[in-house]
Image: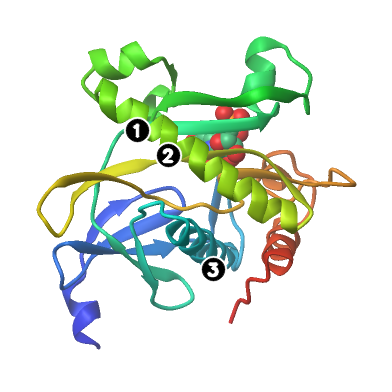
Amino acid sequence: MSLNKVERNIIYQGKAKILYSCSNPSNLIQYFKDDATANNAEKHSIILSKGIINNFISEYLMKSLEIKGIPTHFIKRLNEREQLIKKVKIIPVELVVRNLAAGSIIKRYGINEGIKFSEPLIEFFYKNDSLNDPLLNEQHIEEFGWSDNNEIKLMKKEALRINKILIKIFDNAGIDLVDFKIEFGHCFNKKNEKQIILADEISPDNCRLWDKETKKILDKDIFRKNLGNLISGYQEVADRLGVKIN
Ligand code: UDP
């Protein structure tokens, strides 16, 4: 057994990923599982190789964001299921950026699916499965001490920059970026200054992706809505992005 394997401990076990410690205390290993869940894990399946495709797609998107100046936790992909990442303390607020209406927002406000928002719409949700990730406003986030005004402004600005970059990447692949969810975390940079960086993953598990022409769904809604083969949708996203899975 390699030294790496002996040393690692599970730090966090999520629905779709596991985080392990590694020899460098500033870093972690992020492992992509095949578990697919929906409705706060009410619906659960193992979908063979989903974790592998998400690992490669997320690597590609995180690297593309880094190139455009977005600081992320991504360091490098280690193998087909694992990435080396910077260890961060996750801010328990999920940011959802929406370009077109779909998912929870259409049920919540009774609006039509597919309408384009005049500006990208940002929503916040409290990352807490036992409470079903409730919707938050900025005052809630400050009042409950999860983040402060300056950080919220920064996260919103970063979310909009990320949205612009991702829209372009997917547009070039003939795909509409309908919406996506991101998470940020705190870490310390080389000068020991506290920094906020993009964490978690960006993959068809946490984006809505529609073919621009046919509106065919290529994301986790295939699983949520029983629309067919999830892997063929995810593989199509990888192929269109030019991401090779090997
Ligand atoms: N999303 C996610 N994790 C969550 C909730 C949502 O990654 O716990 C993503 C979801 O895949 C979609 C976007 O965030 O791309 C908006 O999701 P929505 O609020 O519509 O919730 P849903 O009904 O999809 O759970």
Q: Amino acid at mark 2?
A: Glu
**Of circles 3 and 2, which is in front?**
2
Q: Quadrant of ligand 1?
A: top right
**Of circles 3 and 1, which is in front?**
1
Is 105 placed left or right of 232 in the picture? left
Task: Determine crowd level at label 3: few under 14, some 14-19, many 20+ residues with C-alpha closer than 10 A.
Answer: many
The residue under the point 69% across, 19% down is 106
Q: Residue 240, relative to residue 107: is it above or below?
A: below
The residue under the point 68% across, 64% down is 241
Is 37 placed left or right of 210 in the picture? left
Q: Amino acid at mark 3?
A: Phe
Disc 3/disc 1 C-alpha distance (Å): 28 Å
Residue 229 appears at what percent x and percent y? 76, 57
Q: Earlier in the sequence, mark 3 or mark 1?
A: 3
Quarter of the image where one finds residue 18: bottom left
Residue with the most extreme right position? 214
- Would residue 205 be visible to someone looking at this image? no
Answer yes or no: disc 1 within 8 Å of ligand 1.
Answer: no
The residue singled out by tag 3 in the image is 56
The residue singled out by tag 2 in the image is 158
The residue singled out by tag 1 in the image is 154
Answer yes or no: disc 2 within 8 Å of ligand 1.
Answer: no
The residue under the point 53% across, 63% down is 51
Taking depth in this image into account, of 187 and 91 the one nearest to the observer is 187
Residue 138 appears at what percent x and percent y? 37, 16
Q: Report helix, strand or loop for mark 2.
A: helix
Is 145 placed left or right of 54 in the picture? left
Quarter of the image where one finds residue 9: bottom left
Residue 10 appears at what percent x and percent y? 25, 60
